[in-house]
Image: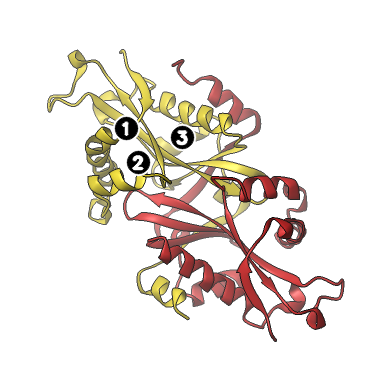
Chain colours: A red, B yellow
Amino acid sequence: MHFKLRPATKEDCKEISRMILELAVYEKMPDQAKISHEELERDGFCQNPFFECLVAEVPEENKSKDGFTVVGYALYFYTYSTWKGPTVFLEDLYVMPEFRGNGFGKGLLCKVAKVGKEKQCVRLQLSVLDWNTPSRDFYAAQGAQDLTDSEGWHFIRFDGQKLDNLANEAPKD
Amino acid sequence: MDFSIRAANVEDCKDIARMILELAEYEKVADHVKVTQRDLEQDGFSKNPFFHGIVAEVPEQHKTKEGHTKIGYALYFYSYSSWSGRAVYMEDLYVMPEFRGKSIGKALMSKVAQLGLAAGCNQLNFTVLDWNKPSMDFYLSQGSFDVTADMGYHCMRCEGEALEHLAQP
């Protein structure tokens, strides 16, 4: 199937936020996706964007049953390892179910890796849910290692009131 | 003990590089560290820095036996959650052993949280090794939660040959 992978534009944010919700439904946490397309527009297309995004687009004649031509996306940003240097973090990789099995996901992943390499990144990192076997198998097949299993790394988070409380305890300047 | 927390500047990179190595030794992987003082200067203090840093400093009279007054640091950058928006990621938090137990680590982490909130962030994220009980206990006692244990997220990485291969299909 013909498809194009290109950088997202501000106008794609409506489609990206639709697909973010679809991915959250797949990950069984639909009420966790609280972001609006306006926030994506603000945060991804300002002077110092918080993220970059690539979309997978099909021609009109292959649009989805609901009429969409933007059918997949990869959202990523740059991070830093104090051991190895610049890293690209793949926050989301998603292809609508009816378009899977055509190489779109692999195409998006490879494009993110290429963009990262051009920015001198030495690592590509992401997270995946432990029960998500198809995704775990996909990433393992691409050569990714599971650092939680092999080295014991855990993600830790402060949010909501706990984050406010922590910030309130910062020493005065 | 008197201490101050301030934004890192390019002159701090020598001490930050020293402490990065000390932290890697604590995490039992000192030979993994490839980043040099020069890399930190370029990557953290250019037009589009990859990270920001804060350092903890003590007055001259409390310097270490080797003469260091910069005795802790935190290194962070902005990231993004496609579910909740802007986030801040704390890559490293470290206080030299002889200065622990004086809330300097807590002060550094709180400062990162404060800077994150000021930038419109809704989350402060980082990683910790599961065997590192003192750190895990510290973070959980401050109100964080273990995303890996509670929600099942695993950290995955591609590097070296696997990354080369991906980038050139």
Residue linked to disc 1: B9
Residue linked to disc 3: B137
Instruction: Give me the residue at 48% from left, 21% from top.
Output: A170
Instruction: Give me the residue at 18% from left, 13% from top.
Output: B61
Give the spatial CA distance, label 2 vs label 1.
Answer: 8 Å
Give residue A27's position: percent from left, percent from top. Answer: 70, 59
Chain identity of mark 1: B
Give the spatial CA distance, label 1 vs label 3.
Answer: 31 Å
Tell me which numbered mark, 2 or 3, is placed earlier along the sequence: 2
Give residue B127's position: percent from left, percent from top. Answer: 46, 46
Estimate how packed mark 1 is, as few (under 14), some (14 to 19) or many (20 or more) residues with alpha carbons within 10 Å.
Answer: some
* Label 2–label 1 contact, CB within 8 A: yes
Of badges 1 and 3, the one in the foreground is 1
Residue linked to disc 2: B45
Chain identity of mark 3: B
Q: Secondary structure at mark 2?
A: loop
Q: Which numbered disc covers residue B125?
A: none
